[in-house]
RNA sequence: GCGGAUGUGGCGUAAUUGGUAGCCGCGUUAGACUUAGGAUCUAAUUCCUCCCGGAGUGGGGGUUCGAGUCCCCCCAUCCGCACCA
């Protein structure tokens, strides 16, 4: 019989299901290994060929590890909460739970067809109450912990309270012991790792929710592309910044690509510098202030008003010619002089109302106003004007800067625009300066020597930095510090389809519901839009109030703020559920704990994580933070969750276009006949009606009613389409569905072909042109086991040396390739092997049986079929990975290329066991060599074993 | 602007990590078997060529007996961040 994948594949998929082949226990004599895929968001569009790429790679690795004798955890689940399901619900009224369920069923069906070895008994769904119970539980733990800077780890907030009780400090002029419950809770909120605060957020009016920084690109929402504005709102946040340093440091311990580590480092954005206090010299107090020493803000009982700035260039403090505050700065109101008030207020209002997109688009445009106020440079005692400008950001540092126009390009632009003085304080060469008025740009580099800089003049930049910081520390007006670009993660979403917060409000103070009452189930609602009052959709829920006495959810009509309290209306963001799912897989049905100590003690952490690099600044940061927190409180046993990470490249689509004439919208011009690109409109056309860039005209006419009477300008009787590489997306009609390919070629061919396309990490456009070659390989491979009449026929004869060599070379190459995740070369190796064996007409069991095991990770269905045909009764998944034998690879003789200093070159054959000296002697003894050397002794002989001999004369 | 990566035939890619560049596959060409083939098999396929050879891994330089691989300078493309002081 022929290679009939249609029969083979469903048969063995059923067999694996029936036999629970991929079921894995948390206990084994074997070593453990955890292979994880980033679980998918089940969108309505179903899987396209890009999704399985990473899954196939990880599946190969997981199967390989099993064959190598590991107990392998390889689970799969669904990141099921999210905006698209909710947007769809708003449009159609269909409950997100229903559409999500349908989408999951569709995903599962598609995944099953590809033959993955997931242990589906461990499936998790983030929207499942049994799962999000633990997301909520973790949130409560975050709420109940603070970050202890001394111990550098999370500690229970009760410890902080005990400390406050004990020390009874003054807080904003009031003793801790004199504070009431509300004041105390507000104070503690400054420390909790999950906290409620008024913070500037990315507000997306169209989506009706706030978004995290990584969910906003170029001032537009990632989902939907709607405008985003900056707005001050009371929101839940996670104090991820407390972990900034550990998030940087942890990157040293993991095997991730350098580029991804760099992306994370950039996102965290650590910079070292100094915080410096600049005293104010307000015009009402026109006396020039005496030495800065008098203004030690911590110690002076009546401090002169001063403000803090952050700089990474303390060495340039002698070059400060003005100061700049961000428009949101609280000091502006106090310091602005009456004559500048109107102007400043106008500017601040304008700046605050600008959308993020406008602000980002006009980065190059300089704007700002003078406040009329002055500060004093603490080192030079100079009076320096204070400006307001939106090039200083509220969210970074202190929202205030010392401007050094000579050595900062932004300050330089500002100074030039407002004609402010520019003073050079750093020079590439010692004591050499030039007039900054002649400069076309500032000198930003951190190299060279200080000039015009008082006591640091002549020092190298690095020394000057240290010296200035020492000085200001000594003066008590500043200190060394580190700033991070990373912001706390905003954790509230004004949406329905997410985890509810286990929080209720008593007199405006949030309290977590008791842990034993979890999960706090998401209530049913009918209308998914925000309420008329602007409340999130949960405002529609009637059963959404907390009965504190009876510990249960009750109707909100009962709220009396005595025993019945309102519950939080926001829900958690998408990254909440995906931040700890890898740990839940270890023990997914545990209803007592997140996961048992035994389970995490056995599996430790993820050995191999496969997924897209697009999560570099989102999920992969949040998950690392989440894990570190769980580590601090003694749940996780490893500080880093993902030991090795492989980023599969995105598979792009290859879109096809037709060109519609602008003059005649029924006329379509073939690509080669388009003379003026402006005369036609390119229109995406479904790639399924295009073959080799040739349009199927009949199907095009049927595709859309408006094309039914289309006319064409053809070349050579054909309509040639244009193409472009774009993201694979429904709207561009360039989606390749894996089901179609499975139906046509089988899952094994699809799996092999996706690997054959190129390195897993590399982005590449999808192209089915080569799939035939892989399909041919399988037919050829099948024929090795079958005779001319297509009946199964393997011989028990002993293999020849040549056949053994082919086998062992293949084992060696494939093993090495899998270890270094180079699956495209493994596929090539299989092809070479099949070609060689076919030309030798080899059908020997001793060769073919190990090959069946070798190919099983890549093509499990055909391997299982052949494995059983060979007479095995157990699954090929339980077989042993074949070992190669070095002896079988050794040749009788080697061919050595020999060259004489690159001038002449020939090849000689030598016995395999010959030593370096033998080889050199043999080469020297050859007539060609003698002739060439002409009696002289060679100067140098370079011998590279089994490679080459070079003789230098 | 800053950071990271990549650049090899008509195309996807490979090269034992410094050792005969172009493996494997697609495509193309020729042939075999065929009623037929979109099945299978065989051969050729980097470019130029007076068929003697010559050039060749984005361009230029360097190190080396030897460079696709290492170093320096450009060029191009892709990705990430982007007024982060």
Image: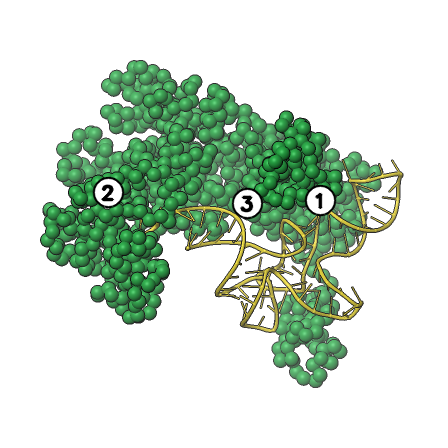
Rendered green, the chain in question is A
The secondary element bearing badge 1 is classed as helix
Task: Label 3, secondary structure: give it.
Answer: loop
- Residue count near mark 3 (Cα–Cα under 10 Å), binned few <14, some 14–19, many ≥20: many
Q: Please state the total of marks drawn on the protein image.
A: 3
Q: Which chain carries label 2?
A: A
Q: Which residue is drawn at 33% across and 49% down?
A: A366
Chain with colour yellow in the figure: B
> Dot 1, crowdedness within 10 Å: few (<14), some or many (≥20)?
few
Q: Can residue A496 be seen in this view?
A: yes
Q: Choose mark 2 or mark 1, whichever is in front.
A: 2
Front-most of residues A667 and A453? A667
Q: In which quarter of the image is residue A64?
A: top right
The spot of residue A40 in percent (x, y) is 51, 34
Q: What percent of the width, then of the height, locates residue A317? A: 25, 58
Residue A773 numbered tag: 1
Look at mark 2 in the image and give the residue it sits on. Answer: A344
Q: Is mark 2 on a helix, strand or loop?
A: helix
| Residue holding disc 3 | A649
Badge 2 and badge 1 in a common chain? yes
What is the spatial separation of the Cα atoms under label 3 and label 1, in whole angstroms?
A: 22 Å
- Specify whether A712 is left or right of A41: right
Q: Do the residues labelled 2 and 3 touch (CB within 8 Å)?
A: no
Q: Do the residues at discs 3 and 1 belong to one chain?
A: yes
The way the protein has been coloured in the rendering is by chain
């Amino acid at each position: 019989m022929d290679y009939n994948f249609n029969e083979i594949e469903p048969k063995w998929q059923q067999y694996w299901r029936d036999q629970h082949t991929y079921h894995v226990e948390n206990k084994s004599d074997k070593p453990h290994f955890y292979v994880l895929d980033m679980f998918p968001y089940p969108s309505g569009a179903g899987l396209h060929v890009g999704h399985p790429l990473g899954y196939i790679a990880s599946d190969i690795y997981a199967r390989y590890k099993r064959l190598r004798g590991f107990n392998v955890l390889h689970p799969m689940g669904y990141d099921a909460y999210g905006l698209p399901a909710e947007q769809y619900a708003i449009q159609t009224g269909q409950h997100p739970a229903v559409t999500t369920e349908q989408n999951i069923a569709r995903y599962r069906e598609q995944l099953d067809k590809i033959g993955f070895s997931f242990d589906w008994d461990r499936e998790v769904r983030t929207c499942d109450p049994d799962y999000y119970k633990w997301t909520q539980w973790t949130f409560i733990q975050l709420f109940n912990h603070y970050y202890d800077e001394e111990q550098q780890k999370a500690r229970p907030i009760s410890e902080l309270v005990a400390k406050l009780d004990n020390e009874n400090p003054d807080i904003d002029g009031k003793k801790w012991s004199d504070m009431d419950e509300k004041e105390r809770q507000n104070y503690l909120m400054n420390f909790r790792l999950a906290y409620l605060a008024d913070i500037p957020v990315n507000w997306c009016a169209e989506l009706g929710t706030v978004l995290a920084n990584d969910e906003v690109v170029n001032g537009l929402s990632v989902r939907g592309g709607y405008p985003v504005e900056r707005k001050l709102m009371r929101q839940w946040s996670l104090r991820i910044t407390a972990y900034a340093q550990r998030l940087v440091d942890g990157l040293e311990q993991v095997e991730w690509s350098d580029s991804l580590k760099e992306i994370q480092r950039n996102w965290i954005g650590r910079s070292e510098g100094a915080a410096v206090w600049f005293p104010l010299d307000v015009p009402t107090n026109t006396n020039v202030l005496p030495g800065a020493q008098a203004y030690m803000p911590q110690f002076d009982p009546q401090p002169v008003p001063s403000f803090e700035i952050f700089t990474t260039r303390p060495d340039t403090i002698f070059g400060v010619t003005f100061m700049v505050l961000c428009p949101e700065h609280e000091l502006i109101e106090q310091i602005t002089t009456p004559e500048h008030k109107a102007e400043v207020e106008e500017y601040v209002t304008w700046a605050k109302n600008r959308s993020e997109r406008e602000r980002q688009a006009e980065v190059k445009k300089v704007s700002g106003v003078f406040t009329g106020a002055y500060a004093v440079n603490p080192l030079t005692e100079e009076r320096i004007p204070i400006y307001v400008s939106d090039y200083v950001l509220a969210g970074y540092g202190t929202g205030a800067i010392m401007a050094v126009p000579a050595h900062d390009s932004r300050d330089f632009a500002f100074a030039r625009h407002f004609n402010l003085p520019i003073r050079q304080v750093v020079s590439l060469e010692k004591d050499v300066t030039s007039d900054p008025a002649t400069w076309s740009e500032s000198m930003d580099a951190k190299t060279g020597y200080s000039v015009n800089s008082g006591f640091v003049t002549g020092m190298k930049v690095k020394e000057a930095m240290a010296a200035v910081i020492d000085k200001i520390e000594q003066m008590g007006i500043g200190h060394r510090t580190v700033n991070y670009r990373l912001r706390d993660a905003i954790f509230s979403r004004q949406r329905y389809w997410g985890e509810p917060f286990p929080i209720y409000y008593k007199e405006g103070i949030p309290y977590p519901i008791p842990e034993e009452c979890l999960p706090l189930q998401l209530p049913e609602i009918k209308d998914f839009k925000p309420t008329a009052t602007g409340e999130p959709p949960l405002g529609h829920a009637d059963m959404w109030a907390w009965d504190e006495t009876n510990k249960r959810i009750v109707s909100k009509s009962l709220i009396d703020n005595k025993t019945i309290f309102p519950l939080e209306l926001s829900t958690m963001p998408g990254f909440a559920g995906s931040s700890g799912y890898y740990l839940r897989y270890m023990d997914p049905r545990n209803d007592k704990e997140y996961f048992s100590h035994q389970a995490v003690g056995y599996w430790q952490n993820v050995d191999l994580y496969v997924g897209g690099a697009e999560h570099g600044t989102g999920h992969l940061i949040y998950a690392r933070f989440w894990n570190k927190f769980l580590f601090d409180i003694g749940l996780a046993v490893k500080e880093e969750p993902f030991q090795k990470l492989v980023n599969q490249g995105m598979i792009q689509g290859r879109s096809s276009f037709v060109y519609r004439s602008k003059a005649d919208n029924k006329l379509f011009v073939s690509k080669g006949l388009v003379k003026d690109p402006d005369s036609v409109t390119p229109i995406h056309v479904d790639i399924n009606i295009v073959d080799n860039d040739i349009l199927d005209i009949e199907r095009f006419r049927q595709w859309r009613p408006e094309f039914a009477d289309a006319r064409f300008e053809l070349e050579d009787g054909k309509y040639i389409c244009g193409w472009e590489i774009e993201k694979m997306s429904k709207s561009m009609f360039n989606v390749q569905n894996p089901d179609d390919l499975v139906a046509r070629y089988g899952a094994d061919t699809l799996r092999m072909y996706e690997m054959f396309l190129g390195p897993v990490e590399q982005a590449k456009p999808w192209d089915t042109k080569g799939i035939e070659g892989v399909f041919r390989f399988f037919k050829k491979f099948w024929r090795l086991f079958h005779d001319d009449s297509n009946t199964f026929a393997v011989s028990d004869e002993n293999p020849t040396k040549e056949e053994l060599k082919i086998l062992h070379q293949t084992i060696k190459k494939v093993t090495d390739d899998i270890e270094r995740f180079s699956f495209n070369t493994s596929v090539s190796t299989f092809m070479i092997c099949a070609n060689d064996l076919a030309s030798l007409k080899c059908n020997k069991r001793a060769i073919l049986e190990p090959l069946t095991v070798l190919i099983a990770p890549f093509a499990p269905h055909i391997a299982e079929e052949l494995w059983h045909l060979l007479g095995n009764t157990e699954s090929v998944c339980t077989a042993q990975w074949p070992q190669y034998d070095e002896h079988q690879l050794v040749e009788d003789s080697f061919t050595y290329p020999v060259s004489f200093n690159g001038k002449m070159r020939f090849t000689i054959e030598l016995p395999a066991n010959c030593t370096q000296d033998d080889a050199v002697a043999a080469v020297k003894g050859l007539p060609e060599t003698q002739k060439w050397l002409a009696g002289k002794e060679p100067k140098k002989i370079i011998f590279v074993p089994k490679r080459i001999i070079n003789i230098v004369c």
